[in-house]
Image (cartoon, rainbow, N blue to C red):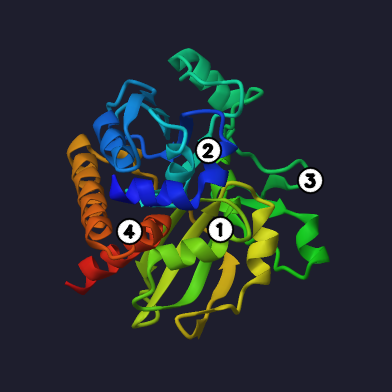
Amino acid sequence: KMVKKRYEESSSSLSSKYRTRVIQVTNIAPQTTKDQMQTLFGYVGKIDDIRLYPTVRDVAFPVQSRVCYVKFSEYSSIPIAQHLTNTVFIDRALIILPILEGIGEIPSESKAMQIQNAGLPNIVSVPEKHLPPHVTSQIQGMPPNHVFVTVDPNFAAEGIPPYPPLRGSLDSGKVEEIRRTITVLNVKTGTMPNQILDLFNEVGEVKYIKMCDRKDVQGELAALVEFSEQASLLKAFKISGTEVNAEAIQVTHSTEAIVKPHAKSNEAAQREIEEAMRRVREAQNMISASIDPGEILLNLPKVLGLLEKKKKSK
């Protein structure tokens, strides 16, 4: 309550522009549960209603992501909730947007799925992404030596290296994912995922991010960053050389996709959810104990990053 009151006093002008008490949360891992969303957004304010779609949760079903609608008791909770945007929950950066003016109720599941797939007026949604029309992919060669060759004419115009060929055995959907993904090299050990996420969110919406050790270079990390839009790669390459933790990162094309979590077992998925919620609870304790809780709330994604760093140091 103290956090909420303090935030309301400093952002009354912000909350006045929202004529809705409903938010839409997208890019949610398929194994996430309604209870986890209830707990996460319950820290923001009192919740009148919450729905998580699709309602079927079994990870054996081919559900790649879920969408959540949260209706708060007070309008002032909307701008607070939006500060959780880009918080990495399990392995994805949440995208939180308000339902626009004139729409004050949570849509039914069938309506929500239509919104998610096609987009409707007055509601913000994230439609399925595809490569733009000017980008062409075709198979060259004969099996088993055939490869996918993708050409973006804008790369040559901007001085960006062309796409490397990919295995011809890949399906077209996987090829599209890879063509929206970059590999970030020369990442210093100790760099947090949120640091890479914050940097590349400046050039385009990041859908997934994965950090890993480099087998060929000891003491160095690499990151795979998948964008929602292929066009974001143009800007991503232009910030190659930016220093992160006093090291100049290097941006290259990826030749592999980020492994998505929907293939995991229910047991493994639940363990990841429990770990993510443990971090959220720790963050809430830090907020409650802080001298300046309002400022901590505004930077909650960074707080979660610090907790992750603390976890790794252990």
Image depth: mark 4 or mark 3 in front: 4
Does residue 6 appear to the left or right of 240 in the view shown?
left
Q: Residues within 10 Å of mark 4 (few under 14, many from 20)?
A: some
Residue at the spot of label 4: 293
Which is more N-terminal, label 1 or label 2?
2
Q: Distance between the Cα atoms at labels 4 and 1?
A: 25 Å
Question: Which amino acid, mark 3?
Answer: His
Q: Is residue 178 above or below residue 74?
A: below
Do the residues bearing badges 4 and 1 touch, measured as CB atoms within 8 Å? no
The reply to whether callout 2 and callout 4 are in contact (CB within 8 Å) is no
Disc 2 from disc 1: Cα separation: 16 Å
Q: Nearer the viewer, mark 2 or mark 4?
A: 4
Q: Earlier in the sequence, mark 3 or mark 2?
A: 2
The local crowd at label 1, few if under 14, some if 14 to 19, many if 20 or more residues have their Cα within 10 Å, is some
Quarter of the picture holding the N terminus: top left
Query: SS for tag 2?
Result: strand
Residue position marked by numbered label 1 in the rendering: 201
Which three-letter amino acid code belongs to the residue tagged 2? Leu
225 or 148: nearer the eye? 225
